[in-house]
Every structure is written in C-alpha cells, then in structure tokens.
Image (cartoon, helix red, strand yellow):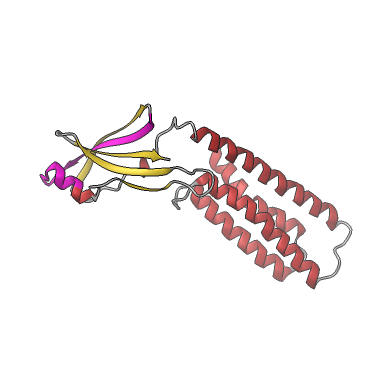
Amino acid sequence: MLTVLGILFAVAPTVVWTTIARTRPVGFAIGGMLLAGAGLLISVQQGWIDAPRPDAHLVFTALAPLLIACGAGLESRHGNSPPPEWIPRRNGAIGFLGTQFALTLVVGLLYALLISEGSDAPPSKALPSLPPGISMADEGISCGSGGCWRAATVTSGDGLSRPEIIRKLGLQQESCRPSGWLLDWRDVCVGAEDNGEKVTVYASWGY
C-alpha cells in the first residue's frame, strides 16, 4: 500500500501538468522532466538509489511546481491566450500542488522533531560493507544515555586476528558522514571495537 501511495505521490505533478499543458513542444519537454524526476524519487523510495527519503520528497515537491510554472510561462509567451476553460484547471493545479507541498513540509518537520529525540538507531545499511572472508555473526540495537546505535559482531573465515580484521575493514578510526541534506542534520558515524574477544562494528548518530 505504501509503495502504491509513493508512486502516486511521485507521478501526481506529471498528471497535473497534462491537464494544463497547451502546446506539444513545451508540454512534452516539461512532462519528460517531471517523469524523470518521478523516476528518481521512486528509485529513492524503493532503495535503488541511496538518498535520504524525507529530503528527496521535500526537494521534489518544491521543484515540481517551479518546473510547471516555468512551462506555463513559456506557453504564455509563445502561444495564444489561454481559453476561459483553462483558468479553472490552472487554479486547481495550483491548489493541488500547494497542498502537496504543504503536507510534505508538515510531515518533514514532524520527522525532524522526532529524530531530534535520538530514540532510533541507524538502519542496517549504515553498517560497513564486509570484504570477502569476513562475515557477520549477529546484529542488534543498543541504547544508552547518548542515544541508540546499531552493532554487529564480525568474524574472519581466513583466520585473521582481531586487529587484522579491523585493518581489513578500514576502520582503525571512526569515520562520519552526513545522514541527510535538509531535514536530517545528523551524521552517521561508523567504527569498530576490539573488546579482547571479538570485533564489533557499529553505526551511531553523531550531532
């Protein structure tokens, strides 16, 4: 159900544009760009492109109306005056796109407030990818006074020592990268620990 709603959300601006486009050259050009943007957004929704989903939705709903406005402006400059029946369609399009952007902004702000509480852990994909010969034994989430983090025990099938495993993973030092662009200002920090018996890799939030 969520997948269907996500696809409808992505293609809605294209459908809106088809109701108000008046010339083929501009109509196809703007429609193609909107479809390309919808394809990128769907790829983010499905996880085919690694990008923060809330930020991607907010950027899409901000840029799509601007693109449609540019298309309508180009048609007005190079075409005839719109017929009277076009005005209600334009007003309906403005109302729909404005509502879509407002809802996305509200949900995005709620998301930003929720993540500021630090009650969640980074997703599994935040853990480092494992090179050949190293496998994951278990994975779990732990929480403390500083927030929650995701950790996994890794082992070597090649008989590597614990320091050698850490070197092969390239995690001699903790590294951090941005988690999002706009709504999620946290960093994802990845590292490895040798507790004397096993090697644990972890992903935690950094602020």
| In the image, farthest residue toward the right | 84
- Please give the name of the residue rendered at 15% of the width and 44% of the height, measured from the top-left corner: 163
Figure check: 206 above or below 31: above
The quarter of the image holding the N terminus is top right
The answer to whether residue 163 shows anywhere in this view is yes
The image quarter containing residue 174 is top left
- Please give the name of the residue rendered at 35% of the width and 34% of the height, measured from the top-left corner: 149
- Judge whether residue 123 is colored magenta: no
Left or right: where 75 falls relative to 108: right
Figure check: 100 above or below 151: below
The answer to whether residue 123 shows anywhere in this view is no
- Please give the name of the residue rendered at 38% of the width and 30% of the height, measured from the top-left corner: 146
- Please give the name of the residue rendered at 36% of the width and 28% of the height, measured from the top-left corner: 143
Judging depth in this view, the residue of 24 and 95 nearest the camera is 95
| In the image, farthest residue toward the bottom | 78
Q: Position of residue 88 (x, y in %)?
A: 84, 52
- Judge whether residue 149 is colored magenta: yes
Q: Position of residue 58 (x, y in %)?
A: 59, 48
User: How many marks do you count on the picture?
Assistant: 0
Over which residues does the magenta segment extend?
Answer: 146-166
Left or right: where 154 falls relative to 178: left
The image quarter containing residue 27 is bottom right
Left or right: where 35 falls relative to 122: right
Judging depth in this view, the residue of 166 and 127 nearest the camera is 166
The quarter of the image holding the C terminus is top left
Q: Position of residue 63 (x, y in %)?
A: 63, 56
Q: Position of residue 159 (x, y in %)?
A: 10, 44
